[in-house]
Amino acid sequence: MWSILLLAASIALIVLVTTRLRLHPFVALLLAAFFFGTLDGLRPGEIIAAINAGFGDTVGAIGIVIIAGSIIGTFLNHSGAAMRLASGFVQLAGRRRVPVAMGAVGYVVSMPVFCDSGFVLLSSINRALAARAGVSLAACAVALSLGLYATHTMVPPTPGPVAAAGIIGADLGIVIGIGAIVSLVSLSAGLVFAYRYAARVEIGSDTQAEEFVEQSDDTGPSVPRSLLPIVLPMLLIVGRTIADVPSAPFGDGMLATSLKFLGEPAIALSIGVVLALTLPARLELRMLSTSGWFGEAIKSAATIIVITGAGGGFGRVLQASGIATDLGTETVARFGGILLPFLVAAAIKTAQGSSTVAMITTAGIVAPMLGTLGLDSEVARAMAVVAIGAGSMVVSHANDSYFWVVTQFSGMTVNQGYRLQTLGTLVQGLTAAAAVWVMSLFLL
């Protein structure tokens, strides 16, 4: 019982120092690790050894993947590929179904791009298309926001799910497969919310000139070229997972060997980076410099990597304490094995605001407990990652930077933000949790 109380106190400490004291999450996680380890009776040397081992193992497992994903996202942003994807999805869906199109483009763009950046990037075309098609700006804004959020929290190579998978030890290919299904279900609920509820809310209008939309249709690489750096790495990672199935569907020859090599997440994402280099109309050497697009991407990735490493260190301290045995079967009976990761992530997300921090922190907390929770198989670990992602959506409110990005770039008041963004993320997160639970009945 003492270890469980210490765990609750450690989570409260993380929330306190990141929200009230505004310390960096890296510092908060290290403080929590030392706080928990010291009061649980671990010696200083044991705590330091656990943090070092957890940090090194975690960063070694996912560092290159996060950097590569960040580079792909940056090139999508600056080359005009993300804008071209938006135009392509709108043409496919039709002008009267702009909310569906914006939800779909958000769903795709947010796999390698942070949802905050994605919304800023796409908000102008979102407002212009809503005005041009004569549809509700609120519905379009909410659809775009929730589309971005669905894959940002549940589908690699977005850094949050990648980091959580690395800490838990889940196979990225399985996470992609399950995350894609659950995120589509949650996006469907988000689109229903946008059409049935958000469309009734009047928010600030925008009368941008239609030539913005016309220009965006003709600039940037083609839609297939824009999709390739995102889709091909995911297909390679999934192919590797299939090749590793005991029944060996691809045999044991050259095809299987190639898929296992190319599907290694670091290799697959590196291939995505090479493809991303083809997106600019003209690749210039300055783009690859420390002050260019490469430098910008690596700076963005560095923050996530150090937070992820600290989360891995915190998780290793929890493992060293033996807290998993303290939880016992009562926790499983009360919360359900697959729902506990969701509840922990939802509590941390709601309290401190950042979905990525919530995912990393929760992964560190539940990793030592997977055996006790009955989630130690390959599929179960992947489902735990997706459950954590679902929890990290609940809910986006005033302590979340994404809340302010969505409200300010859409012309919402704070009250409208709570009615639309906060309620929408609650609907989407609960739907995702329900989908994970239903899938667990058949897969676990």
Image: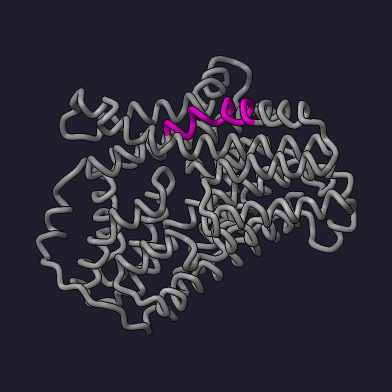
> Per the image, is 331 magenta?
no
Please name the residue shown 52% across and 59% down the image: 353
Residue 170 seen by the camera: no
Please name the residue shown 75% across and 57% down the image: 441
Tell me where the magenta segment starts and ends, as one range: 55-68
Report how many numbered discs are placed on residues in the image.
0
Overall secondary structure of the magenta section: helix
Please name the residue shown 16% across and 60% down the image: 213
Q: Position of residue 239 (x, y in %)?
A: 54, 32
**Quadrant location of the N terminus?**
bottom right
Name which quarter of the figure residue 284 lies in: top left
Q: Position of residue 420 (x, y in %)?
A: 44, 75
Between residue 214 and residue 324, name the one nearer to us: 324
Name which quarter of the figure residue 368 lies in: top right
> Per the image, is 63 magenta?
yes
Q: Position of residue 277 (x, y in %)?
A: 28, 29
Between residue 61 and residue 431, name the one nearer to us: 61
319 sits to left or right of 160: right
Please name the residue shown 52% across and 46% down the image: 24
